[in-house]
Image (tube, rainbow, N blue to C red):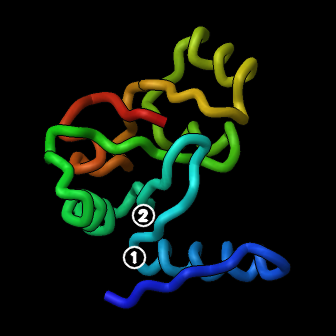
Amino acid sequence: MQTKLWKLDNKRNQAIEEAAALIRKGKVVAFPTETVYGLGANGLDGAACRKIFAAKGRPADNPLILHIAEKEDMEALTSGLSPLAQALMDAFWPGPMTLIVPKSDKIPDVVTAGLDTVAV
């Protein structure tokens, strides 16, 4: 695997587009979060998510967290939101808050370690 590093000076949008294209192709990318660097892939692509587990040596019973760009993206990932979950999203998103919600059928079991819920 070839590693590519982008410097996010004046080419920030280009770097994001390139990383997004890699994710769409089933590749894994590293990205900064508020606390650590994470590995990311398309959370709806089981094969791509297995690459994260392999790269990190992550146990298969340790679920992944899905990251979304917009609150509206949650709709496709869950089989239903409670009023409390909706209120928390409205109050604290965007921001570093993870919700555990019932997963939709679109979420591969590898992402949730076979659980009926998903972290978003």
Q: Are marks 1 and 2 in contact (CB under 8 Å)?
A: yes
Q: CA distance from mark 1 to mark 2?
A: 6 Å
**What SS does tag 1 mark?**
loop
Res. 21 image quadrant: bottom right
For this view, does 98 lie left or right of residue 92? left
Q: Which residue appears at 37% of the width and 34% of the height? A: 118
Q: Which residue appears at 20% of the width and 50% of the height? A: 58
Q: Which residue appears at 57% of the width and 38% of the height? A: 74
Query: Closest to the observer: 86 or 9?
Result: 9
| Residue indicated by mark 2 | 41
Residue type at tag 2: Ala
- Disc assigned to residue 44: none
Few, some or many residues within 10 Å of mark 1 (<14, 14–19, 20+)? some
Res. 95 image quadrant: top right
Query: Closest to the observer: 104 or 118?
Result: 118
Residue 40 percent location from the top left of the image: 44, 60
Quarter of the picture containing the N terminus is: bottom left
Residue type at tag 1: Lys
Few, some or many residues within 10 Å of mark 2 (<14, 14–19, 20+)? many
For this view, does 10 lie left or right of residue 120? right
Query: Closest to the observer: 94 or 1?
Result: 1
Residue 10 percent location from the top left of the image: 84, 79
| Residue indicated by mark 1 | 27
Residue 79 percent location from the top left of the image: 43, 30
Relative to 75, say whether 50 is above or below.
Answer: below
